[in-house]
Image: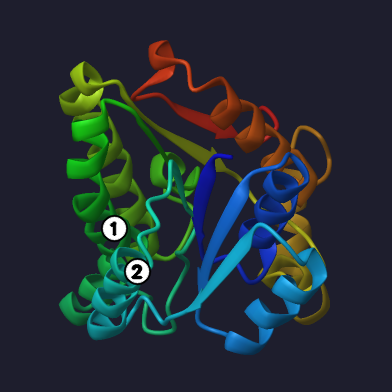
Amino acid sequence: MLKVLITGASSGVGLEVARRFHNENFYILLVARSADKLLAIKNELKNNIEVYPFDLMDRNSLHNFLLSLQSDNILPDIVIHNVGGRLEADEQPLTYEALQQSVHLNLGIAVSINSFLLPFYVKRKKGYILHISSDSATNGEGAPGYVASKAALNAYIKSTARFYAKDNICINGVMPGIIEFEGSSWARKRQIAPKIYYQALSRQPLQRFATLQEISQFILLLVKAQNMQTTGQIYILNGGK
């Protein structure tokens, strides 16, 4: 049974991806800040699941998480990097400190986990890593630190995939547009900032935002294929925008 590690797995895209992979008989390893949410997910899914309540923004906690994987002798076959987002201080004019925090959240955590796992993947000559980026990286629509971090993530994906292709390690990215679901930031915007919400909605060719089901379905298909001809590719999922 293949093991898949999903970061930021307690809600939103991470949780939907976790449920979808679990239903496809993957053994899932979930890491997120909230121990209560992770426990609820474990109780819901019942088997073939391990949960790790660590705040990966904290560098000591991130280090301890990697030690936990090592001590549990669990090596994921697949990694899905979902943790990321916009921080409160991420606004114009962007400060260097806010940029550093955003880079750590949206790129640094994934780099740290990859640097731990890649030597094992090289040794076994197999591995799959998927990064969830954002179409903000190419259109510039978003908070400045978030946009810059996701653009850097895309460059990292391309460079790293090229380097490890010879080791049969497939590294991909997906760039979703706006995803709306209950409890999401855009669902809240609909209530508290309807002008911003409907302006964004008017720019969508589909006349709606993406759903969790659409994004998670594509991720599952991509991961299950593990086609080395796709390595280094970053797929835009924004409905033709």
Q: Foreground: 121 or 186?
A: 121
For label 1, the SS is: helix
Could you classify mark 1 by the number of other residues whose Cα lies within 10 Å: few (under 14), some (14-19), or many (20 or more)? some
Q: Residue at x 15, y 26 (%)?
A: 163
Locate residue 107: give its quadrant.
bottom left
Amino acid type of disc 2?
Leu
86 w.r.t. 59: above or below: above
Q: Position of residue 73 (x, y in %)?
A: 35, 60
Along the horizontal axis of the image, is 202 left or right of 139?
right
Total residue callouts = 2
Position above or below: 181 against 177:
below
Q: CA distance from mark 1 to mark 2?
A: 12 Å
* Quadrant position of the C terminus in the picture: top right
Contact between labelled residues 2 and 1, with CB atoms less than 8 Å apart:
no
Location of residue 83 with respect to 213 vertically, above or below? below
If you read the primary sequence from the N terminus, does the residue marked by circle 1 or circle 2 appear first? 2
164 left or right of 9?
A: left
Scheme of colours in the image: rainbow
Give the labeled residue for mark 1.
Answer: 113
Asked which secondary structure carries label 2, the reply is helix
Q: Which mark is residue 136?
A: none
Residue type of the residue flagged with mark 1: Ile
Residue depicted at x 55% and y 65%: 30
Q: Quadrant of the N terminus?
A: top right
Residue 71 placement (x, y as % from top left): 31, 70
Point out residue 42 in the picture as x, y percentages from the top left corner: 70, 72
Q: Residue furthest bottom?
A: 36
What residue did someone put label 2 on?
105
Visible residue check, residue 78: yes
Which of these two is toward me, 27 or 154? 27
* Of 46 and 6, the residue lying toward us: 46
Q: Nearer the viewer, residue 198 or 152?
A: 152
